[in-house]
Each structure stands twice: as structure tokens, then as C-alpha cells.
Amino acid sequence: MSNASGTGNKKNPVGNFFSVLGNGIKDIGVTFVSGDWKTKISYLVMGFGQIMRGQFLRGGMYLAVELLFIWFVTSFGGQYFAKLGTLGIVETTKKNRTTVYGDNSFLILLFGLLTVFFIIFLIVLWYMNIRDNKKQEEILKSGKTLPGNKADFLSLFDSNFDKTLLALPVAGVFAFTVLPIVFMICVAFTNYDATHQAPTKLFTWVGFENFRNLFSFGTGGFGSTFLSVLVWTLIWALLATFIDYFLGIAVAMLINKKGIKFKKFWRTCLVMTIAVPQFVSLLYVSKMFDSAGIINGTLMKLGIIQNAIPFWTDPTLAKITIVVVNIWIGIPYLMLMATGLLMNIPADLYESAKIDGATPWQMFRHITMPYMLFVTGPYLLTSYTGNLNNFNVIYLLTGGGPKSMTYTGGAGGTDLLVTWLYKMTINDTDYKMAAVIGIMVFVVTAVISLVVYQMLPSVKDEEGFQ
């Protein structure tokens, strides 16, 4: 009964968020009504209550952040935040051969977002300041004394050391990960491209126009190109992951089989593929399969073919060649990983299976593969999502080509979403559509990762092989 009741009372994330928000607002009002004059002033001057109660270090930190915010908004961030709704209206002009710069939409968007984050951070810190004042009042009413400044300082390296240690990494993650991602998402809702290039030209908000264009199959729409590139991206990731996976396991089992000689030599030959940087090996392979490359040249000299095989100029053949080349690259990694895992399977399982009359195929199917899938399930997921964004193999072999006249937006016959995004940014400077494609890459990767993760044996049955 208790479990059923507990399950029934669980709230969805949205309802839980609004519940926490409502309780927080209520707490702010109650604290203001019941708090002393020091707490009330702290609603305007952060840290005032702490300073008046002798906690100068803690109160000084709150006050310093508030003063920093006021300085930032009044001298720098406020002017960009005020123009965030329009992204600028004053265009750059030329007068008497002199360029008079107007608004810079890029900087307005960037520093406007930075100001928004600063405001959110200050609101959170302001609420923490109020809660701290409330807690201090409760401590004093109970007859206890507040921690001194020395105790507050030492707590930064003791009870609160986790916060001290994570402060710099969190700031770095925000500056170099969160802010750029939010900026890219915002660019997807603007007309930022080659014809609206800051600082000489303004760009502005266009709502969901870019997303409608991406899914439009009409003239000038990206719908057919997006669908074709998306399907090839999913097929490529599936083939690149599972062909390498099963062949890697097969090669590892073959080399580890009793009676095979020179095992170290065979492993060394395969590992040599890993030792050579992909940048070098893939470019070399690209030239080998070229129309004037060594493979076509040799076959033509031997009289096997009359005309060069279009490895890179025929879209279908180019895709097949990419998958084959990726097998050569991927098998050594899987072979090394599978070699270690195969040695951990208890030999008693195989001996018992032989006694029961199991064939080698039955032992592989019911012992080897279940164990391998259980242990390597998370690796398969990360490998699949990695292949969805495998820029190196595609771009170094074909550059996304061959070009297709039927594809809108400069995409080629072997382009993945990530290489198409790169071309959009570098070649076409179509930043708005590149941002939209970047969002779609995230959506596709996130959905597949979440769905497949719930299906992994190691997630559904954690005790299965323990």
C-alpha cells in the first residue's frame, strides 16, 4: 500500500518545478514579514544583514557580487541587454570615405545573453542571501552564536570544500559550453548569414522561419536534402558501429583460438592501423581510391578494367567504399577490447556447455555474445552516437562529395549532418541554417541515446553477470 501510494503521489517534472517555485516565493514573502530590520534591508543591499551580525566575510561576498552586477549593467551589459529584442537598429554607414559603425548584432546577442545569465545568477544569489538571513535569525533566537569570520573562511577548505573546488570548473563549463550552446540556439531564430554579416550588416529575429525552411519540400526548401542526409547519417552510424563490432569480436576470437601461431604478430599488424594518425592514413587512402590512384591504375594496367572505377564520384559506390575503409580503421579497436573481455569469460561455462553437447555456434550465441553485449552495451551506445558525428572519416575521404545538384544547401552525396553543418558555416557562411542543423543533430543524438540506453542489458539487469 505504501509503495502504491508513494508512486501515485509522484509529480511530473513540470509540476514539481512550479511547486518548488511557489514555495520559494512564499518563503521570500514570509521571511520579509517576519524578519528583523537587518533582514529587510538585505532585500535591497545583499549581505547587509550578515555584515551587521558580524559575518563580514560572508556579507562582503554577497555585497561584492551585487556591486559587480551594478557596475556591469550600468557600464557595459545594460546597453546590449536593452537592444536584445531587436538586435540593433542603427546600421553601419560610410560618410566622406569614413566608416561610421552602428550597432553590432553579434555583440548585442552575445553580451545580451551574458547579461541575462548574470541576472539569473544574481536572482539565485539574492534568494540564497535571504535564506541565509532567515537561518541566522533562527540561530540567534535559539540562543546559539553565529560562526565567526575565521570559521567561515576555514569552511571553504573543509565542509564547503566541494563548492570551492568546483567553482572554477563550473565557471569554465558555463563560459565555454553553456553560453556558446545557448548562443547557437538563438542564432537559429535569426537571419544571420553572409548577407547579414556583423559588424557591417545587421541581423534580426525571424522566429521559426529557418525551421520551416529546413522541413520545407518546396522550391528553395531544405526538406529533401535534410531527409536524405539524415537517412544516410543513421544508416552510416548503424553500419559503422555494428559491422566493426561483430568483425572485431570475430577477429579477436580467431586470433585467440588454440592452435593459431604468431598471435602477437597478427595483433601487431592490426594495431599498426591505430598507430598511424587518421589524418595521414585517411588522406592516403583517399588518394589510393581516386580515379588516377594506385588501385585504379594497377587494375587498368593488368587489363582487369578498361575505365577507372568511380569510387568517389558515384554516390552509392562512395558510400560503400567509406563503410569498407571504416572497417579497416575500426576493427583493431574492437579486437583489442574484445581480446581482454573474452579472457574474462569463465572457462567453466564453455566446459559445461561442451559436456552438454553444445556446438561452437550455440556457445557463441548463448555464452559469448550475451556476455559481450552486457559488458560493451554502453560502449556500443557511445560508438553509435560518435559515428553520427564522425567528421574525420567522411571529410578526409570524400569531403562530403560527390556534389549533388539536387541537394539544396551545398550538401554532397556522402555528407553527414555534421559535415553538412561544417560546410554551411565555412563555405556558405549560412550561420542561421547551420545553427538549425546543429540543433537537429543534438535532437537526433539525444533521442537515440535515451531510447537505446533504456534497452541496454546492463541497465535493465545490472546483476545479470555478477
Image (tube, rainbow, N blue to C red):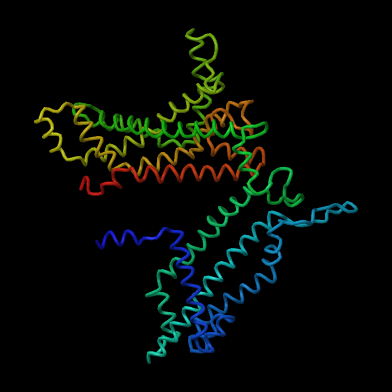
Q: Position of residue 166 (x, y in %)?
A: 44, 65
Q: How many discs mark residues in the rendered view?
A: 0
Left or right: 155 in relation to 417: left
Q: Determine whether 121 is above or below 364 in the image.
A: below
Residue at 26 percent across and 40 percent down: it is: 341
Q: Residue at x 10, y 30 (%)?
A: 356
Q: Between 265 and 17, which is closer to the camera in this rendering?
A: 17
* Quarter of the figure with residue 437: top right
Q: Is residue 194 left or right of residue 139?
A: right
Pick the residue in front: 334 or 443: 443
Q: Would you say 230 lies left or right of 83 here?
A: left
Dividing the picture into quadrants, the one containing residue 165 is bottom left
Please say if 202 is above or below 336. below
Residue 448 location (% of width, % of height): 43, 42
Image quadrant occupied by the N terminus: bottom left
Residue occupying the point 32% across, 31% down: 246
Nearer to me, 397 or 137: 137
* The furthest residue to the left: 355
